[in-house]
Amino acid sequence: MDWNFSTTLIGSLPYDDAKTALDRILDGNVTCPAWPQLPALGYSESMYVQTGCYLPGIEIDVNGKKISADTVNYDPTEIYTAILSGDESYFGHPDKYHKGLYEFILRDLSEFKAVKGQVTGPISEGLQILDRNCRPVIYDDAYSEIVRKTVNMAAKWQAKGLSKCNGNVIMFFDEPSLTLLGTPFASISNDQAAEWINESMEGLDCLKAIHCCGNTDWATVLRTDIDILSFDAYAYAHTIAMFPDEVSRFLEKGGTLSWGIIPSSDDAIEIETAGSLAKIFRENIKALVRKGIDEDLIVKRSLMTPQCGLGGMEVWNADKALIMLREVSEAMREHYGVSE
């Protein structure tokens, strides 16, 4: 599919009710709308809770804003029965943790270019959930496998539901913890990370994306089974240009770059304009072209998003970011002479 700077969102928004959030998303600024996570409603809307709430032995402390797991005294029978039987309904998202999703699927989404969902990826979920000894559950072999299979089944359930709203579904696996690869804070190899990401995407009948809002080993990410690489282009586009061969192969086989060019912080959004961001964007594309990557191919295979979720912004600045997303997209299409 040719994207030509179509737009989507990463996940969170700062509004305190789902209807308002959806009204903002669907008012013409976003080409490929996404269901919103709503952290203003509390910890129940945490990305780690939303994906981890199905796990056996899981302990969610909404007031203490903490998710942990008892990896010793848990019974895996029920969840493995659902996994082995392919029972996706077991992983149907509880509405108390997914207010935005349930409002999203009530809307008419049929005329949009695509719709986007999201789950937390297996690396981030496994590193952020701690056992009772404050050790990340990713280091418990048996429980880590359950995390990966849970991510996979939750993504399948969500993609199947979204496909009833729109024939083109993009499923993002949000992986902020990929920035920890190669550091003492993540004692897993790049090969393990790639293998586990692929396991979590296996059998998914939609476009698959990884989102990482920091710097990581992009060569490792680009050799996974993703269709879309989503990255923070406002702060880290130069790191993508360090892997021209990998990026070129990715694009040539049909991959897409999703550029997080709109700032997701209050300070940055207040000093930027659509013109200044479009200029930064064009310079980032030129950097790839200078490395030998075809410009027309980059344009065709480019989506646009904010840097990361907008949930930490003031409401008025999030509104500004959504408008700016559309304005920068329009400026880029005009510059390169393409239509949506």
Image: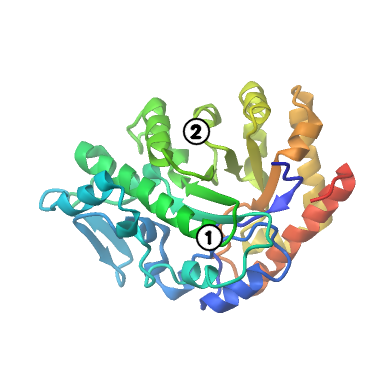
Quick check: marks 1 and 2 in contact, CB under 8 Å?
no
Query: Pointer 2: residues within 10 angstroms few (<14), some, or many (20+)?
Result: some
Q: Quadrant of residue 111?
A: bottom right
The tag earlier along the polypeptide, 1 or 2, is: 1
Residue at 65% x, 32% y is 254
The type of colouring in the image is rainbow
Task: Please tell me which residue is depicted at 38% across the width and 63% down the height of the picture.
Answer: 93
Q: Which residue is mark 2?
A: 225
Q: x and y percent of residue 227 in the render?
A: 57, 38
Q: Is residue 120 above or below residue 142?
A: below
User: Residue at 39% across / 46% down in the picture?
Assistant: 124
Residue occupied by mark 1: 164
Q: Kindly tell me whether residue 152 is visible in this rendering.
A: yes
Cα separation, mark 1 vs mark 2, equals 24 Å
Q: Secondary structure at mark 2?
A: loop
Q: Is residue 151 above or below residue 31?
A: above
Residue 195 point in image, percent of width and height = 39, 30
Q: Please state which of residues 133 and 220 is positioned toward the viewer in this rendering.
A: 220
Give the residue furthest to the left.
73
